[in-house]
Each structure stands twice: as structure tokens, then as C-alpha cells.
Image: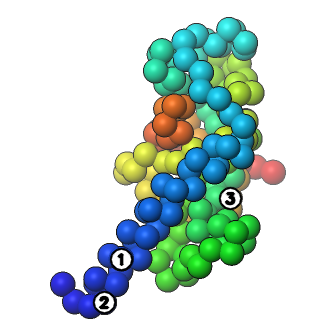
Amino acid sequence: MSTKQKGHVLVISALIIGALSITPLLLAQTGSTTKTGSDTKTGSDTKKSTEGVYKNITLEGQNICLGCTLKMEKGAQSQCSIFGHKHFLKVTKAVCEKGHEHSDMEGIYLHYLETEKSTDLIGGHHSENLIIKGTVYLDERVLEVDSFKEAKE
């Protein structure tokens, strides 16, 4: 492995460690709590297991870059222009397939489960407002993308 490749591995490792260390801060910022069982507050028909899994849900939100956000808000030395953006979704609206809104998801940050369908969102669509359909693993704050499109303003 060349010195340049070793340097890239170190930077990527640092980004991963940074992302893992910021997750508790993001969760604390939202003030959200983990819920299990059926959602009696909204009377939701969303398919949800006792493990906090929401299937067939439509989310609206902004695709936010972790590195750029940390650089602007906390002075982090991220280098997205060199290594690329690593996005997550800041949820502004969540609606189940029956049309019921899930206000408990508003304002939370969801990281993308890396799949073929999420690859473009992880590295692209910088700061865009999106509509995404998929499965939310709420306890893990992860979104598995089925499809997405840009939200019309």
C-alpha cells in the first residue's frame, strides 16, 4: 500500500470515527426518544414491529452533509472537497402509506443504509430537499431507501 493510500485510509478512518462520535450529539440535539410497540399517538397503520421498524414510509427532508455541517457549526477540519460528501437526511415530514403523519420523526437525522438505491444520496444531492420512500430503523436512526425524488418547492 502506498503512502498516499495509507493517508486516505487514515482520513477515512477519522471520518468514520467522527461520524460515530457525533451521533449521540445529533440525537441529544433532537431531544427524541426511542419508542417501541404500536404507535397509539398517531393511530398509525404503518407496518411497525416492536423493534422500531417503519416500513413503506414516505419521508420529506433535506440531504445534509455531515462534514460540511460540522465544519460550519463546530469548526471541524472536514475536507469534503477532497474526499466527497457523506450525507444523511434531516426529516421534516414522515407519512405512512395510509396517510398518517408521524410527528415523532420530525427533526431527527437518519443515516442511509448503504445499498445500490442509496449510493447517489450518500455522496450527492448536496443540501437538496428530497422525498424518499423506504424503511426506517428508528432505534438505529437508519433509512433503507426504496426510491427518492427531489421535492418541489
Q: Residues within 10 Å of mark 2 (few under 14, many from 20)?
A: few
Q: Give the mark, 1 or 3, whose residue is nearer the N terminus.
A: 1
Report which residue position mark 2 lands on.
4
Q: Which residue is mark 3?
A: 128
Say if residue 42 shows up in the picture.
yes
Q: Check the image and name the residue furthest to the bottom.
A: 3
Q: Which residue sits at x=68%, y=33%?
A: 32
- Residue ID at (49%, 24%): 53
Q: Quadrant of residue 78?
A: bottom right
Q: Quadrant of the N terminus?
A: bottom left
Furthest toward the right, the residue is 153
From the image, tell me which residue sits under label 1.
10
Of the residues shown, which amino acid type is indicated by label 2?
Lys
- Looking at the image, is mark 2 or mark 3 nearer the viewer? 2
Callout 3 crowding tier (Cα within 10 Å): few <14, some 14–19, many ≥20: some
Give how far across and how far down residue 97 sits, in percent. Answer: 60, 21
Residue 133 drawn at (x, y percent): 56, 36
Mark 1 neighbour class, 10 Å CA radius: few under 14, some 14 to 19, many 20 or more: few
CA–CA distance in space, label 2 to label 3: 32 Å
Residue 114, percent from left and from top:
40, 50
Look at discs 1 and 3 and give the one toward the viewer: 1
Position above or below: 40 against 8: above
Q: Is residue 92 above or below residue 6?
A: above
Q: Is residue 53 left or right of residue 29?
A: left
Count of marks, rendered view: 3
Q: Quadrant of residue 13?
A: bottom left
Residue 78 got which mark?
none
